[in-house]
Image (tube, grey):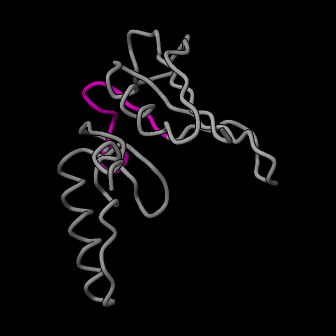
């Protein structure tokens, strides 16, 4: 078991500002990252952090790899709508449905223009892509 996935649940009532306190809701090991994401999806506000525990020269500092907020987080692009965490070309951010559609179409058009296959994981809720 070289990877540890910790699911932490926020205990705050308002999840738009600084959250906390956090409590550990579950821990998964090895290939259990999908189960950790699904567990976080069941909670009102939760994060999944991963930490490498093996012997290779990787960083061993835990870092957040997934976040879920019930009814979605504030959209990174428009700042008005709410939506799920999505992968973009730069990083994972919350994106509302309208912005997801716009940026997904732009990604597909750019891919076609360059003769590439569009990445099916971009601008789609991360939770929907975990079984790809």
Name the quadrant of the N terminus.
top right
In the image, residue 104 lies in the stretch drawn in magenta: no
As drawn, 13 above or below 64:
above
Residue sitting nearer the eye, 129 or 103: 129
Task: Identify which residue is drawn at 46% across, 9% down.
Answer: 11
Q: Residue at x 53, y 14 (%)?
A: 20
Q: In the rendered picture of this protein, how many numbered marks are placed on residues? A: 0
Residue at image coords 76%, 47%: 59
Q: Quadrant of residue 12?
A: top left
Rendering coords of residue 7 (x, y %): 51, 24
Position of residue 126 relative to residue 114, above or below, is above
- In the image, which residues are magenta? 66-78
Residue 98's x, y, as percent? 17, 51
Residue drawn at (68%, 42%), measured in percent from left and top? 2
Q: Quadrant of residue 85?
A: top left
Residue 75 lies in the magenta stretch? yes
In the rendered view, tell whether residue 19 sits above or below residue 53.
Answer: above
Position of the C terminus by quadrant? bottom left
Image-based side of 109 in relation to 66, left or right: left
From the viewer's perspective, is 6 left or right of 73?
Answer: right
In x, y percent, where is residue 35? Answer: 41, 33
Q: In front here: 112 or 28?
A: 28
Closer to the camera in the image, 32 or 109: 32
Is 116 placed left or right of 97 in the picture? right
């Amino acid at each position: 078991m070289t990877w540890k996935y910790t699911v932490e649940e926020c205990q705050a009532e308002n999840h738009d500002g600084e959250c906390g306190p956090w409590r550990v809701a579950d821990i998964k090991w090895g290939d259990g990252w999908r189960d950790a994401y699904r567990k976080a999806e069941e909670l009102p506000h939760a994060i999944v952090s991963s930490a490498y525990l093996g012997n290779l020269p990787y960083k061993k500092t835990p870092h957040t790899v997934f976040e879920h907020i019930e009814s979605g987080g504030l959209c990174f692009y428009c700042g008005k709508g709410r939506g799920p965490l999505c992968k973009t070309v730069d990083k994972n951010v919350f994106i509302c449905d309208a912005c997801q559609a716009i940026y997904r179409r732009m990604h597909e058009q750019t891919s076609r223009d360059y003769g590439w296959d569009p990445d099916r994981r971009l601008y789609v809720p991360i939770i929907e892509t975990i079984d790809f």
